[in-house]
Image (tube, rainbow, N blue to C red):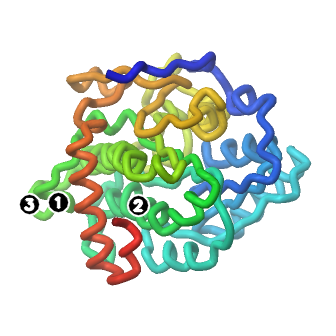
Amino acid sequence: MTTRITTPFGFASTADEVVEGIDLTGRRAIVTGASSGIGVETVRALARTGAEVTLAVRDTAAGERTARDVTASTGNPAIRVERLDVADLASVQAFVERWDGPVHVLVNNAGVMAVPELRRTGEGWENQFATNHMGHFALTTGLHPALAAEGARVVAVSSSGHLISPVVFDDLHFLFRPYDPLVAYGQSKTAVVQFAVAASARWSGDGVTVNAVMPGAIATNLQRHTGGLRTPEERRKTPQQGASTTLVVATSPLLDGVGGRYFEDGSEAQVVHDANGWSAGVADYAIDPANADRLWDVSHRLLSAATGSRAAHAV
């Protein structure tokens, strides 16, 4: 039984509070989905540490605006923008091929939520599973040599929505089940947690740690398909607060060598064995090593079938 990890940070902590005193000068970070919501505040906080930060975004014009704003507010000129659409495997592969040198922090932040109608990618994958999990799976495994070069931290942004559904291995893409936007979202966010568990187990010997985080309830364009944020006011966070747990996992010396866990409000979450109001804790099925291993194998097979030999490094 592992000891649950706690830190001095909590629900109301901000990203800037978390990185106070942290020096990442000479380190390189990548943040996906970095031009809106908590992605912007994640980039800003990493910039304050002196890191070189790459905004990996679909809309490079929006990324450039964010980069200019971050440089202006932090004084850090080393803010770059690269195109990346995690729902498009060709875009992911191109990003990986362009990357040169080590990566010290990778924040898999991009995502979609509760897409109202069933959409499939060109590979036939359900859109939320493809975007939230498979795209980041391809990105992270593709960047593994760069991550392993100097021992990186990977942050996989999940959600309390994972409590809505486990990964349904027999019908990942809703070929048999009636499509439900929130169930599909929940499944994809469970996959994010299971990826963290599986990747950390495989890569700890390379000095790479992977953890999942729950940012909290933050009003952003993520809720554009749900009619806006419906969480009670007292349980909502600002984007600065929402980015804080990501920054704990990405930068805190308290988490050196720690991987395969799920954090919320700055500390490792309690394991829960029922839906728990879909508000807090990590489901036992999400951190189960056997489930994580199964997802890793399935994801590798899906990626191999879609891209051929390019996925060989995912083993």
Above or below: residue 171 compared with residue 2: below
| Residue 137 marker | 2
Extreme-left residue of the structure: 176
Label 3 SS: loop
Question: Which residue is disc 3 drawn over?
Answer: 176
**Quarter of the image where the C terminus is located:** bottom left
The CA span between labels 2 and 1 is 20 Å
Q: Residue at x 51, y 53 (%)?
A: 206
Of discs 3 and 2, which sits in the foreground? 2
Query: Which residue is situated farthest in the bottom direction here?
Result: 308
Callout 1 amino acid: Phe
Q: Amino acid at mark 2?
A: Phe
Q: Nearer the viewer, residue 35 or 139?
A: 139
Instruction: State the quadrant of the N terminus.
Output: top left
User: What residue is at 34 percent from the left and 57 percent from the top?
Assistant: 128
How many numbered marks have been drawn onto this rendered protein structure?
Answer: 3
Which residue is found at the position 37% from the left and 23% from the top? 2
Residue 258 lies, in percent from the top left, at: 50, 35
Residue at numbered disc 1: 174
